[in-house]
């Protein structure tokens, strides 16, 4: 008597393992790409440290000169342009509030007089330069600031 008995499938790829393996490869490629970008050494971004000039930018009032404490960072927003302003007598300078390495919002550390990034151990001086002596990060972009004759501080921002 001749019976047809199915032979066991010796192939290691089955209908079930193929999609699971494909998903695993895709997840590995995506996470490898992400971590490769995050963990690579900092590269100087094009235009880092240069003034931010928004397309169709306009002057936006952000504070009175008297509201800014001498030498202390004050976070302001001029539309989509976030900045820290620093008063020096009757003049005001400003830097971007976004870290030049990772796109994180910086925080003013008044005890150390530094801008600190909450995403990684990076700090910047009020002029936007990195304090790390070993792996210098690109400087923060500056923002365009002016003080009007009436004592108002304006930042070139977006409406």
Image (spheres, rainbow, N blue to C red):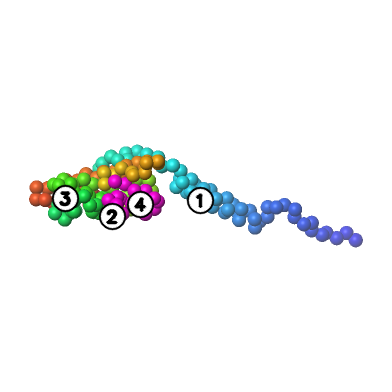
Dot 4 or dot 2, earlier in sequence: 2
Question: Of callouts 4 and 1, which one flags the residue occurring earlier in the amino acid sequence?
Answer: 1
Residue at image point 39% right, 50% down? 121
* Marks 4 and 3, the one that precedes in the sequence: 4
Q: Residues within 10 Å of mark 1 (few under 14, many from 20)?
A: few
**Eye-nearest disc, 1 or 3:** 3
**View extreme (right): residue:** 1
Q: CA distance from mark 1 to mark 3?
A: 44 Å
Secondary structure of the residue carrying tag 3 is strand
Q: Residue at x 57, y 54 (%)?
A: 23
Q: Residue 91 location in percent, x, y?
A: 16, 45
- Find disc 2 in the rendering and name its residue: 111
Tell me the element at label 4.
strand
Residue sitting at x 63%, y 53%: 18
Q: Which residue is mark 1?
A: 31
Q: Which mark is residue 23?
A: none
The residues colored magenta run: 107-125
- Asked whether 117 falls inside the magenta stretch, the response is yes
Helix, strand or loop at label 2? It is: loop
Give the mark nearest the N terminus, 2 or 1: 1
Tell me if residue 100 comes above or below residue 75 in the rendering.
above
**In front: label 4 or label 2:** 2
From the top left corner, tell me how far across and down residue 99 is, in percent: 34, 48
Rounded to the nearest angstrom, the CA distance separating label 4 from label 2 is 15 Å
Distance in Å between CA atoms under marks 2 and 1: 38 Å
Mark closer to the observer (2, 1): 2
- Residue 152 percent coordinates (x, y): 13, 51
Residue tagged 3 = 153
The residue identified by callout 4 is 117
Front residue of 61/9: it is: 61
């Amino acid at each position: 008597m001749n019976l047809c008995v199915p032979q066991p499938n010796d192939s290691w790829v089955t209908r079930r393992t193929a999609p699971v393996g494909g998903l695993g490869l895709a997840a590995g490629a995506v996470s490898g790409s992400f971590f490769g970008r995050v963990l690579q050494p900092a590269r100087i971004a094009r235009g880092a440290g240069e003034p931010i000039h928004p397309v169709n930018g306009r002057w936006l009032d952000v504070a009175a000169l008297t509201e800014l404490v001498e030498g202390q960072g004050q976070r302001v927003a001029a539309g989509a342009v976030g900045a820290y302003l620093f008063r020096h007598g009757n003049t005001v300078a400003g830097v971007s509030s976004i870290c030049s390495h990772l796109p994180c919002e910086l925080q003013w550390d008044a005890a150390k007089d530094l801008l600190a990034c909450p995403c990684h151990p990076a700090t910047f001086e009020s002029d936007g330069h990195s304090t790390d002596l070993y792996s210098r990060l690109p400087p923060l972009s500056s923002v365009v600031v002016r003080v009007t004759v009436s004592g108002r501080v304006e930042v070139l921002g977006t409406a």
